[in-house]
Image (tube, rainbow, N blue to C red):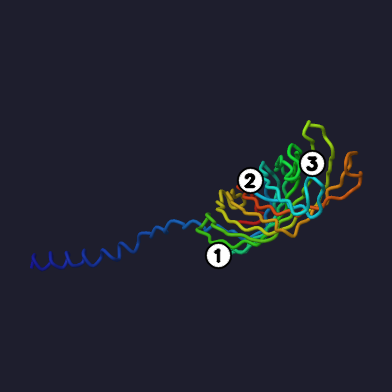
Amino acid sequence: MRKAICLVSALAAITSVPVLAADYPVKAPANVATAYNWTGFYIGIHGGYAWGDGTTENITGSTNFPAGLIRDRHPSGPFAGGQIGANYQFGQWVLGIEADLAASGIEGHEVEESPVTPGVLSHTSGRYPWIATVTGRLGYAMNNILFYGKGGGVWSGHEAASFTTNASGTVTTMTRGSETLSGWTAGGGIEIGLHPNISIKAEYDHYDFGPSNVQRLVYFSTGTIPVGTVNTRKIQDTMDLFKIGLNWKFSGR
């Protein structure tokens, strides 16, 4: 009889374990971190350095530097500015558009000897006081890290001045002129979200100002060529740029 009572007591204890366990509260799972949201409008600042290669070809010419003469050029320098844009995220893909404008210290200086008259030199300087782009962006997001490519149009101011010296070093002619160059751009980079509204980026871009750009340089000094004479050149430049930037997004979570 005592054995039967013990057995019944043991079975009751075993069967009561689930019931007792059910009486204890179940701890809720830890909250899963919210995925980074790239959708929204943003503004930002950027800066960097550019280096390039290019040529100018004389469409009109002079006795010492005839039409068809091609000069090499290698502009370089820093730039800094701002950008505005918008992104829309669907899944891990991010589609966007961006416009930027930068003040630029990009410039180049070249000295070319006349192919006709030995000792006669042309001293040319060119600078790009501003650069602007409008591009589309397509990226792939890994939470708060975005890898993206971009492409679109680029425009730049271009100011040039030149003077010619004879074999004795005397300045004989001087010219100056300014035009707006246009072309295309392509590039890519990485952007990292540090906060729902703040991100930083590092980017490489390539600019191509094709051969359709023409600049008019006007002679403004006395010399062998009358003042007001126009010298027209065809400009073909390419540039490579590295930039870093900071963006502030107006919406986020």
Q: Amino acid at mark 3?
A: Ser
CA gap, disc 3 and disc 2: 21 Å
Looking at the rendered structure, the secondary structure element under dot 1 is strand
Frontmost residue, 178 versus 17? 178
Image coords of residue 123 (percent x, y): 75, 39
Q: Is residue 6 visible?
A: yes
Which tag, 2 or 1, sits closer to the chain's start?
A: 2
Say whether marks 2 and 1 touch (CB < 8 Å).
Answer: no
Which tag, 3 or 2, sits closer to the chain's start?
A: 2
Quadrant in which the C terminus is drawn: bottom right
Q: Which residue is mark 2?
A: 51
Frontmost residue, 202 versus 181? 181
Q: Which residue is mark 1?
A: 93
- Point 56% across, 48% down: residue: 194
Frontmost residue, 31 versus 177? 177
Which mark is in front, 3 or 2? Answer: 3
Quadrant in the rendering for residue 147: bottom right
Q: Amino acid at mark 1?
A: Trp
Q: Is residue 109 visible?
A: no
Which tag, 3 or 1, sits closer to the chain's start?
A: 1
Residue at the outermost front position: 117
Q: Is residue 229 left or right of residue 134?
A: right
Frontmost residue, 207 versus 48? 207
Q: Is residue 53 left or right of residue 147?
A: right
- Point 87% across, 50% down: residue: 230
Mark seen at residue 212: none
Image coords of residue 135 (percent x, y): 67, 60
Mark seen at residue 162: 3
Crowdedness of circle 1 by 10 Å Cα count: few (<14), some, many (20+)? some
Looking at the rendered structure, the secondary structure element under dot 3 is strand
